[in-house]
Amino acid sequence: MTGALRLVHAHGDRITVRAPAAGVELLAYVYRREAAWEAPRPYLHPIRTLSGAVVTDYRPHDHRWHKGLSLTASHLSGANLWGGNTYVHGQGYLALPERVGSMRHTGFDEVTAAGDRVVIAERLTWHPYDGELWAEEERRIEVHDVAPDSGSWALTWTSAVTNRRAEPLRFGSPTTAGRELAGYTGLFWRGPRAFRAGRILGPQGEGPELMGTRAPWLAYSGEHDGVDGHATLVFAHAPENDHSGAGGTHPAHWFVRDEPFAAVAPSWSFFEELELAPGATLRRRYRVVVADGAWRRGDVVKYLEVHPW
């Protein structure tokens, strides 16, 4: 038995999840509104391993809009729901505050802790700078599989984004706008500063060359500052994740960097824009495993076999 999980809801601010048996606050889900320039949106930070080590970064000096683990849309029909400067082909990154939008919390349908599982089910709206309603999102974050024996726990992030415009929503990235190997959009993790030059693993390869490749999972290991040891995060697609909606494949390309910072995103639109028709819904489900130690490929494969979708 792993023991019951506990949560505390500071209304209007955040929800924290604690594993009492380990004496650790595993995560905080922050949904208060923050600076407009940073494209306000809910995020998870800090995220901690069972040993208490932090594995996310928040407002680093190089990108103040990077906040732990969050869902982003860097290029969305001309809007920037990522935050900060906007990439414009031929001109680089420009300060265009009139393009920076937001994702707004509108309510919770469920916030529960039952035994070894926590559920946070939330409704959000997506807006460009002028506040027009562009999309509605149903989001579900689950914390589960806390396993002290392996020093790991997992969260599952599910989002269903429905286009509420009268025209298609076009999900893009800096790469679709002309910048090479910058296909970040969708679920985005920013690792702590100490995780620079960490180890990147995939099912068939390793290292920064996995940027822009396709695979059902990707893992990133880094070494902590302040405390001894390493941690590994595994990012995995649910089997049904598919741009066409047909299921059974993993067409999204991985955005991953170990320099000048640690970051991972299963990009929605690395090389090509993804178009969402009026009234249509884009559904994605991911698992993020947070583990103490520097896992090897065999460790990841074994974990995913023991914990199937």
Image: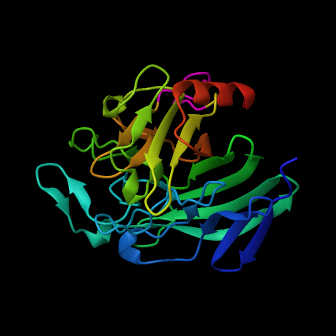
Q: Magenta stretch: dominant SS?
A: loop
In this view, the residue in front, 271 or 125, is 271
Residue 278: image x %, image y %? 53, 47
In this view, the residue in front, 27 or 112, is 27
Residue 42: image x %, image y %? 56, 66
Of all residues, the one furthest to the front in this rendering is 228
Q: Is 112 positioned to the left or the right of 224 in the image?
A: right
Rendered position, 126 above or below 304? below
In this view, the residue in front, 130 or 100, is 100
Look at the image and give the residue range highlighted in magenta: 241-251
Q: For residue 115, what is the image quadrant? A: bottom right
Rendered position, 67 above or below 275? below
Of all residues, the one furthest to the left in this rendering is 90
Q: Is 6 positioned to the left or the right of 41 in the image?
A: right
Q: Is 112 positioned to the left or the right of 100 in the image?
A: right
In this view, the residue in front, 141 or 79, is 141
The quadrant of the picture occupied by the C terminus is top right
Judge whether residue 79 can be spotted in this image. yes
Judge whether residue 169 can be spotted in this image. no
Rendered position, 290 above or below 82? above
Q: For residue 139, what is the image quadrant? A: bottom right
Q: For residue 120, what is the image quadrant? A: bottom right
Residue 70: image x %, image y %? 51, 57
Residue at point 36% right, 30% down? 210
Residue at point 61% right, 21% down? 248
Q: Is 247 contained in the magenta span? A: yes
Q: Is 14 positioned to the left or the right of 191 in the image?
A: right
Residue at point 45% right, 19% down? 204
Residue at point 62% right, 49% down? 159
